[in-house]
Amino acid sequence: MDLLRHKKLAAGRGFLDDQFLIAMPGMKDDRFTRSVIYICAHSDEGAMGLIINQTQQMLFPDLLVQLGIMNEQEAIRLPAHARDFVVRNGGPVDRSRGFVLHSGDYRVESSLSVSDDICLTATVDILRAISTGRGPRHALMALGYSGWGAGQLESEIAENGWLTCPATTELLFDTDIERKYDRILASIGIDLAHLSAAAGHA
């Protein structure tokens, strides 16, 4: 993906990198209702992120078999941490492509640093590592991603479509996916009942 390649070559970060994007109650696009997106790359050319609180039906062992990383017999014998690893819906773009967000204790040549502590890797090496217990300490996997063209995300934020706040590794990687939206709002002191769906104009 061009935005990720550009980020790897460019120095510095976009101002929305390593931020949570939280859908406002008035979100018009049903695909993003009550979604939390972790922004991996942001620049003048656009933005790319992964929804972190929507799950896929596909199980991680099934994905490993589908990708030819192991056969069904090997998948059955996976350790619990790999067997229970949740595959998430990262967004509506390129839904057959996998991305792993993870702690910086694991890096391969293709890993992209999002922040000092968080990396993004989109190659099968990391899936093999996770399946054998040699992967990063913290990780989440998503199929597909969420993308915006130049200026599009900034416009959506200005129109009150999204809230933003700095991401924390605890809220990013914890496994309480169902309550993540409410908990991230609570972490920045916002009560959903008091959020307005309409943009304010001075």
Image (cartoon, rainbow, N blue to C red):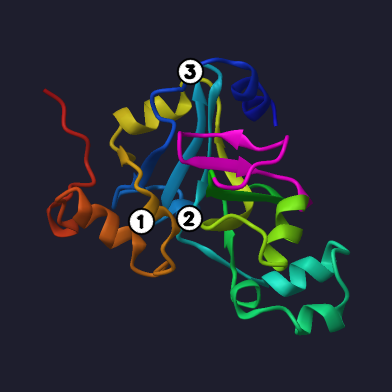
Q: Kindly indicate the quadrant of the structure image that contains residue 17.
A: top left
Q: Is residue 166 magenta?
A: no
Image x and y of residue 42, in percent:
49, 26
Q: Are marks 3 and 2 in contact (CB under 8 Å)?
A: no
Foreground label between 1 and 2: 1
Tell me the residue at 71%/67% (across/down).
131
| Mark 2, other Cα within 10 Å: few <14 / some 14–19 / many ≥20 | many
Q: Earlier in the sequence, mark 1 or mark 2?
A: 2
Task: Specify the amino acid type for callout 3.
Answer: Gly
Decide if residue 82 is on the left or right side of residue 183.
right
Q: Are marks 3 and 1 in contact (CB under 8 Å)?
A: no
Task: Report how far apart the C-alphas of labels 3 and 2 lie in the structure.
Answer: 24 Å
Decide if residue 126 is on the left or right side of residue 175.
right
- Point out the image quarter for the C terminus: top left
Image disc number at residue 51: none
Magenta residues, dominant SS class = loop
SS class, disc 3: loop
Image x and y of residue 44, in percent:
50, 16
Tell me the residue at 35%/44% (across/down).
167
Q: Earlier in the sequence, mark 3 or mark 1?
A: 3
Q: Is residue 107 magenta?
A: yes
Q: Which residue is mark 1?
A: 171
- The part of the chain drawn in magenta is 105-124
Task: Report how far apart the C-alphas of labels 3 and 1 lie in the structure.
Answer: 24 Å
Q: Which residue is mark 3?
A: 12
| Mark 1, other Cα within 10 Å: few <14 / some 14–19 / many ≥20 | some
Q: Kindly indicate the quadrant of the structure image that contains residue 7.
A: top right
Q: Which residue is mark 2?
A: 52
SS class, disc 2: loop
Tell me the residue at 64%/18% (across/down).
9
For residue 122, above or below residue 149: below
Closest to the observer, 18 or 116:
116
